[in-house]
Image (cartoon, grey):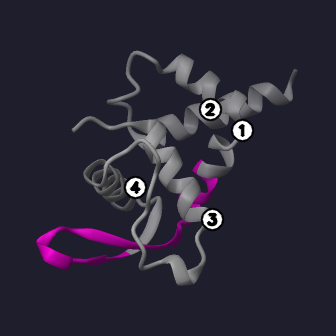
Amino acid sequence: MQRDMHLIRAILMGVEQRSEADAGRPIVIEGYDEEAIRYHTWLAVDSGLIDADEVHPYDDILFRSHKLTTEGQSFVDLARDEDTWNRALRRCELCIRTIPFDVFHTMMAYEAVMALGT
């Protein structure tokens, strides 16, 4: 499965909105199946964007997402702005499925800083 930055963004924004009571419930993102959401949640956890406990119901690895890490919150803060998100995507459109999260995060930060000068 290839990385989908749009799904990562949706998962992180969803985790940001979750209450502690929602932590044990599966993350649902319209238009994506459970397998894709689970895989991309794992990518976000593995990359240090989400702080989560690993659980293993029915031999499927699921994550009970508790909260964003500081890095995850920073990513969401930048990704929330549609202009910043779209400018960074355009800059990285050829490599978006292979670009590391930290590089894409840096690109969004660059776009946000550049927007301050206009």
Q: Is residue 83 left or right of residue 28?
A: right
Foreground of the two, 99 or 33: 33
Residue drawn at x 48%, y 37% as measured from the top left:
6
Q: Real-space Cα distance between discs 4 and 2?
A: 17 Å
Q: CA distance from mark 2 to mark 3?
A: 19 Å
Mark linked to residue 85:
2
Distance, label 4 to label 1, CA atoms, is 19 Å
Q: Farthest residue in the bottom direction?
A: 21
Secondary structure under the numbered disc 1 in the rendered image: loop
First to last magenta residue range:
53-75
Residue type, numbered disc 3? Gln
Mark 2 vs 1: CB contact within 8 A: yes
Q: 14 above or below 4?
A: below
Q: Pick the residue in front: 29 or 69.
A: 29
Residue 86: give x, y in percent of width and height. 62, 25
Residue marked by disc 4: 44
Q: Quadrant of residue 98?
A: top left
Instruction: Report which residue position mark 3 lands on.
Output: 17
Question: Contact, CB < 8 Å: mark 2 with mark 3?
Answer: no
Residue at position x 28%, y 53% from top? Answer: 39
2 or 3: tag closer to the N-terminus = 3
How far apart marks 1 and 3 lie (CA) works out to 16 Å
Give residue 106's quadrant in the image: top right
The answer to which of marks 4 and 2 sits earlier in the sequence is 4
- Ranked by sequence position, the earlier of labels 1 and 3 is 3
Disc 4 is placed on an element classified as: helix
